[in-house]
Each structure stands twice: as structure tokens, then as C-alpha cells.
Image (tube, rainbow, N blue to C red):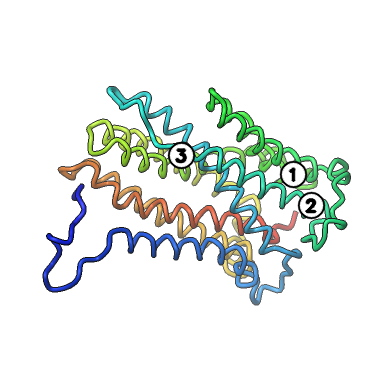
Amino acid sequence: MTLTRPTAETADASGPARRPGVGRAAAVLVLATLAVAIPLLGPSAALHDTGEAAAPGAGGVALLRAVLFVALCVPLGELFVRRLARSVPGAPPDGPRSWAPYAAAVGAVAALGLAAIVATGNRVPHSLSQIDVGGLYASRDGKLALLEVNAFLVAGLCARSGRPAVQVWPLGAVIVAEALRAHPPAEHTPLVGSALTLVHLTCAALWAGGLPHVLRTLRRWGPTAQGAALLGRYARVAAVLLAGVTATGVWSSLRRMPSGTILTQLTDTAYGRTLLAKVLLVAVVAALALCARLRLRRAPDPLAACVPARVEVAALGLVVVVSGLLTALPLPIRW
């Protein structure tokens, strides 16, 4: 992997030199389009010929939930990687600029949108008069929605303070609220389901949010031995996080789709189809992570592992978006 960019003088004479960053901008545009299209169009595609009915505004809920998950991953990943960076001997003291305040603001807006939907009886409001703010305090889902809004606001204030590490507490409150929301009391053994979701979401947030900050840190530090060491430390922890995501994901799936019917439900229900797409994406991410780890060990330049790692970031982003879609689809379980 070269660390210098080609200039007009070194470009191939057989054709005009490409402007740097054009391909990257095109890739970002495509990914941004997919990130919006998947949650908005996904419910109708997943529900096709299943006989199931989507909840009103499922596309909007899926989009807001995906945005909320991204806003949760970014600051948690930053805190995680900054802790790893401090453990690297001789690491430069400066790091990339924090995105946590912006993520908290975006998360608060997404949580507010979800709270507004809960306040109108789980329907997309078409006017402010339809939103019953006081009714949020009368229901469990409403209280959890308000908790998420307030937690993101507090996390933003913490990110702007002199001790940004304390934002881990309000971000943890968001994870707890999501875990409780996903498993209402009417469900069989809801505490077990909430515990699985808590571990699953925590591992996923650290994994998906940590890798982008690692790459940003490496770009800030340049081609140094400390950068390679940081990437290696992240890779080792990421393997544990992947194991946690896989184990809790499989257990949760078996709780919602009994082993005797899981193969059928993976193709005949909207939840199962979306879950299958998520599993395939996670498999791609795992393959990219393995490729990056092999490059880190064998390549003359350990920073060559950044190439598959960048693709891994894009794939992780799609996993987060599909996860948001998964929360808006009807569950196939029959208790």
C-alpha cells in the first residue's frame, strides 16, 4: 500500500489523470443511498408474499432506528479506541477530532422522532396536534422513548465537557432502554431476552463504532509503528466482540424462531428474510476482518490491512442499517 498519492506528472501518459477522491466520493454516495433506501423500501420487499402486515410507518421507524444505532456506535467506538490508544507505548497524544457531539445530536433527533411515533399510538404523526406528549409517561414504551431522548442530550453535554469519558453512562442507558423495549413483559422470559440484546448491542456498537475511529486515528498518526500496534490491538478485541455478537444473535434467533421451524421462517417470514440478510452481511464482515488480520501479520507493511478494513467499515454500516429494519418488522414467534 503506497502512502503517497499520484500526481499529474506521474500519471499514465495513455490517459488523463483521475482526480483523487472521486472514487471514494462515489462510493460514499452509493452507500448513503443504500442506507436510506434499505429501511424505507425494505419492509415492503421483506413482507412480499409472506401474508404478514407491516405496522404503519414501518419504513420511517426502520430509518429512525438505524440512525439511532449509528449515533450510538460512533461515541462508544471513540471511547473504546481512545482507551486502546492510551495503552500503546509511545502513542502520539493527539487523535482525530471527536464526532461524539454530532452523533449525540443526531441520536437525540432520531429518538425524538421515535418518541413522537409512540406518542401517537405507534403511528406516524401528520400534525403536532396528534402527538400526546403527556401520554408518554403513561406507558412503558413511552417512558423508554423519553429516556433515550434525554440520554442522548446528556451524552452530548458530556462529550462537550472536560471529561468526555462520562458519556459512557448515558449511552449505556440508551442500550438498556433498547434492550427493555425489544422484549416487553408479555414475552416469555423477557429478562433473558433483554440480557441477550444488551450484550449483543454493546458488542456490536463497540465493533462497528471502533473500526472507523481506528482508521481515522491511523490517518492522523501516519505510517508509524504505533499505528500498526493500535490496529493489532483492535483486531484482537474485535475477534472477541464478533464472538459475542454471534453467540447472542444465534441464541436470540432460536428464542424467536424455534429450531424446528427456523429454516422455513428464514425464507417465509419478513423477519426471517431480513435476519438471513443480516447474517450474510456479518459473514462478509467476518471474512474482511480475517483478511485484514492476515495482512496485518504477513504483509511487509502492516498498515496494508487498512484496505480491507475500509471495506469492512462499509459492510458494518449496512449491517447496522439492516438491524434498524429488523426492529420494525413483525416478529414471527408464537409463544
Q: Secondary structure at mark 1?
A: helix
Q: Amino acid at mark 2?
A: Val
Q: Identify the residue at image location x=32%, y=33%.
A: 230
Residue receiving disc 3: 241
Along the viewing direction, whichever of 113 and 195 lies nearer the viewer: 113
Residue 149 image point, x, y percent = 70, 41
Q: Secondary structure at mark 3?
A: helix
Q: Secondary structure at mark 2?
A: helix
Residue 142 visible in the snapshot = yes
Q: Quadrant of residue 25?
A: bottom left
Residue receiving disc 1: 145
Residue 118: which numbered mark, if any? Answer: 2
Instruction: Determine contact: label 1, label 2, CB under 8 Å.
Output: yes
Q: Amino acid at mark 3?
A: Leu
Q: Identify the residue at image location x=53%, y=38%.
A: 100
Residue 27 image point, x, y percent = 39, 62
Label located before the other in sequence (3 or 1) = 1
Q: Identify the residue at image location x=54%, y=23%.
A: 163
The mark lying in front, picked from 3 and 1, is 1
Instruction: Determine contact: label 2, label 3, CB under 8 Å.
Output: no
Along the viewing direction, whichever of 228 and 239 lies nearer the viewer: 228
Q: CA distance from mark 1 to mark 2?
A: 8 Å
Q: For this view, does 289 lie left or right of residue 154?
A: left
Q: CA distance from mark 2 to mark 3?
A: 32 Å
Instruction: Determine contact: label 3, label 1, CB under 8 Å.
Output: no
Q: For this view, does 16 lie left or right of residue 193?
A: left
Q: Identify the residue at image location x=26%, y=38%.
A: 222
